[in-house]
Image (cartoon, helix red, strand yellow):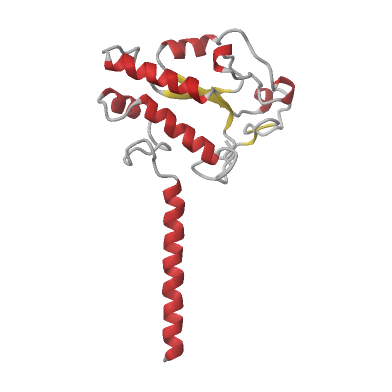
Amino acid sequence: MYSSKIRVTWAFTILSLTIVWRLGIDDVHRNRYLPKSIDLLTATASELSHQLSNGSITSIQLVKEYHERIQMDNAQGLSLRAVLSMAPRHITLATAEARDKERRNGISRGPLHGIPIFIKGNMATGPDLNMSTSFGAYAFENATTDHDAFLVAKAREAGMIIMGKTNLGEFNGFKDQTISPAWSALGGETISPYDNKVRT
């Protein structure tokens, strides 16, 4: 009888610790700057635009939340290795503040006004964003340009906030057709945040 009570007590203790541990993991990825109802893994640009338009959230909140998640899970944590480089935090926050101010003053540059985005590591950005255009290769690790690529310039004109550059198949896969489209020498192998068995 006494032995049975001990087994039940231990089972209950282990169950409790498991629940606490599981909640702890989930709690790590809770929103710190955005409402709990917003899931950054599934939220679309259209949904975020609607929330920005009705004043539920701000671009500054979005930028801060994305910074938090990237710092947590890109090189450590889940080790997604999705981001090659980040624009300086003070630059993205200043841009977000400017987009928020425009919105408060009734100015909208379009449906993507104030939406943070990432571009591939093969797209050129001007010196103000302080990022190289590396193609994921060590040979171009410090390569810079004096102006934005056409599409990047248009995105910024439309009010989007360039937060950083994402990993890609090194040299877009032209270096070697057998290289994984999710791998580069600089970035390593990118893992899907939705399924860690998938390389994206």
The answer to whether residue 111 is seen in the rendering is: no
Most extreme residue toward the bottom is 1
- Give coordinates of residue 77: x percent, y percent: 55, 45
The answer to whether residue 58 is seen in the rendering is: yes
Apparent side of residue 61 relative to residue 183 in the rendered image (left or right): left
Viewport quadrant of the N terminus: bottom left
Most extreme residue toward the front is 90
- Tally the numbered discs: 0
Apparent side of residue 190 relative to residue 194 in the rendered image (left or right): right
Please tell me which residue lies in front, 85 or 200. Answer: 85
Viewport quadrant of the C terminus: top right
- Give coordinates of residue 115: x percent, y percent: 40, 23
- Give coordinates of residue 131: x percent, y percent: 60, 19
Please tell me which residue lies in front, 13 or 133. Answer: 13
- Using the image, determine if residue 134 lies above or below residue 197: above
Please tell me which residue lies in front, 189 or 79. Answer: 79
Q: Quadrant of residue 155?
A: top left
